Amino acid sequence: MVHADRVSKSFGSNRVLKSISLTVKRGEVLCLVGPSGSGKSTFLRCINHLERVDAGRLTVDGVLVGYEERGDKLYELHPKEAARQRRDIGMVFQRFNLFPHMTALENIVEAPIRVKGVKKADAVARARELLARVGLAEKADAYPAHLSGGQQQRVAIARALAMDPKLMLFDEPTSALDPELVGEVLDVMKTLAESGMTMIVVTHEMGFAREVADSLVFMDGGVVVESGDPVEVLGNPQHKRTQAFLSKVL
């Protein structure tokens, strides 16, 4: 589903990603862990072309992301074309980014109606299904200000799912939540993983990574330091940098 081949990205003189290569199979859950500033979120944003890569290639479902190949050169897609690609990739951010002037239901139906041309009645029916799926059927008419952080994040997940994505990206989806609200969001993500959704999750929740992920990647300084089975990497890390990081977070 996702293939990164020597992906690099710099901001000015700061090399944030240094030749990242990895593969995520269809239906697989990959967790990216590592210290702040290691490049995890930047890599995630490159997957849906919110950030441009400077070198290397990223494909989603066999299609080059953000670029087209002509001869032996890559040319960046027009923003409208890039946005069209992005429709198939759901993304959930640290901050919930809900429209504050819209109800939970209105937040969810907005993109399917405006971007995909779904009939309003169909979009509303689907939104109600998704709200029930994330345990918020009774909050359809609530505005974000009247929802807890965990509830807002679950609405954000439902909003991403409303576009029927083939891939879901989660950028530290629980880091802005009070500790007692983390579990309700992780439970929704677990259910999503069990349904066969391909997911890449940047997280500090090592228990979630151990329980749900098919593979785990530890990044530091813009490189993949260690990767493999989550139980193996977390229980018996081979690299000194991984050992030092995990000794502080486990």
Image: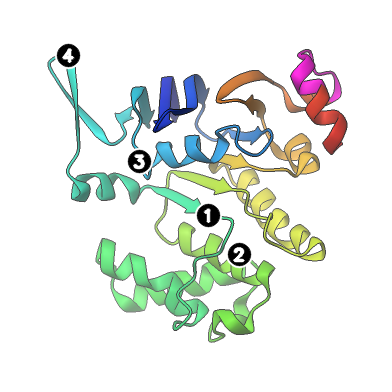
Dot placed on the residue nearer the N-terminal end, 1 or 3: 3
Residue type for callout 3? His
Q: CA distance from mark 1 to mark 3?
A: 15 Å
**Which residue in the structure is indicated by mark 1?**
92
Q: Which mark is residue 49?
A: 3
Q: Secondary structure at mark 3?
A: loop
Dot placed on the residue nearer the N-terminal end, 3 or 2: 3
**Which residue in the structure is indicated by mark 2?**
153
Q: CA distance from mark 1 to mark 2?
A: 8 Å
Q: CA distance from mark 3 to mark 4?
A: 21 Å
Q: Which residues are magenta?
A: 235-243
**Which residue in the structure is indicated by mark 4?**
72
Dot placed on the residue nearer the N-terminal end, 3 or 4: 3
Image: 170 above or below 94? above
Q: Are marks 3 and 2 in contact (CB under 8 Å)?
A: no
Image: 203 above or below 227? below
Residue type for callout 4? Asp
Q: Secondary structure at mark 2?
A: helix
